[in-house]
Amino acid sequence: MFALNILDYSPIDEGAAARDALLQTIELAKLADRLGYRRFWVAEHHKVLSVAGSSPEMLMMQLAASTERIRIGSGGVMLPHYSSYKVAENFRMLEALHPDRIDLGIGRSRSYKDVNQALNESKGIKVSYEQQIQDLQKYFTDDTESTHRFRQLVATPITETAPEIWLLGTGHGSAAIAAKNGLAYAFAHFARPAADGAEAVAAYREKFRPSDLLAEPHVAIAVFAVVADTAEEAEKLAQALDLWLLFVESETPPPYYPSSETAERRGFSRSEREKVEKNRERMIIGDAETVKAEIVRLAEVYGADEVTVIPNVSGAANRMKMLSLLAEAFSLSVE
């Protein structure tokens, strides 16, 4: 059976503030820890005013200190914006304080143009994404023997253990990089539920080369899920997710995650309904048993070792209830 994880965006509910969202994420992580989920990851979003998760490393420090067992990770750090050396130092600091509990999920940035400019305006020559990945591996293994351009440089603090590195992606390109460099691979089914996703994952497994940090291929898939006591309640929550996705793609999105009541009152135009129907392909909606069955089916399609659920629904109480319902359906327990 595959492991079950959580990826939280820290959504700012309608009528709430960013601080509220971050405090709710802490409570959600505590609950996931108690229920028996394997990992709890947080995202990096810029210029998305309806979510509070802009700096995963900072939030991870609080989450790791607030939990006892669950692995805490980034889903993910957008590596091209940053220095691999500094990322390695940040995550080694986390690892030093919370050994064998830290995950570094990395991805490529697809941010707004001005966000990319603001995060990179002081840079000279940019290092390739794959080189940055190899740099991280060098720093996490204390390699001073290779021909690396910073051969004698080590990332501090020195730790006996290393964070797990996961490459996040949506297709064959990222799968190939993960395989070539011996990284775990997290496929974003929620972003691109394409027919060739399973092919990309299969190619990753076939072409995987062991690294000093990972001996065998390891795959997770990430899904949007909306779970409630009944299918009818789940549908109401899903309408709010429908509206939020439309907001995010609009030119002037509001700085909050809409409630189900707001979504019901507002409704959708004909052109919006076409987008909603398309976005519904990215979600699993229903009561716990219905959602469980679809998660199990997708895990079999992808041959996934783990499934990461994104509980991106309105209302902190609804997110907490969703984690409890899924944990019960999957018979999760703390080892």
Image (cartoon, rainbow, N blue to C red):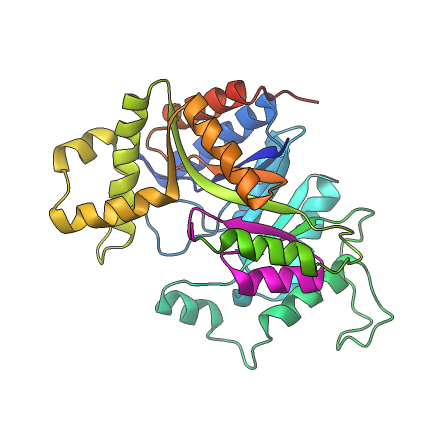
Tell me which residue sits at (40%, 62%) in the image.
Answer: 111
167 relative to 312 in the view: left or right: right
Which quadrant holds residue 12? Answer: top left
For the C terminus, give its image quadrant. Answer: top right
| Residue 76 can be seen in this image | no
Relative vertical location of residue 316 with respect to residue 58 in this rendering, above or below: above
Tell me which residue sits at (77%, 54%) in the image.
Answer: 213
Q: Compare residues 79 and 324 and report the one nearer the observer.
A: 324
68 relative to 318 in the view: left or right: right
| Position in image of residue 327 (x %, y %) | 53, 22
Tell me which residue sits at (85%, 68%) in the image.
Answer: 144
Q: Is residue 183 magenta?
A: yes
| Position in image of residue 266 (x %, y %) | 13, 37
Q: Compare residues 1 and 234 and report the one nearer the observer.
A: 1
Tell me which residue sits at (17%, 32%) in the image.
Answer: 264
| Residue 208 can be seen in this image | yes
Q: Is residue 232 magenta?
A: no
For the N terminus, give its image quadrant. Answer: top right
Residue sitting at the far right: 145
Write the start and end of the magenta stretch as one range.
166-194
| Position in image of residue 7 (x %, y %) | 50, 40
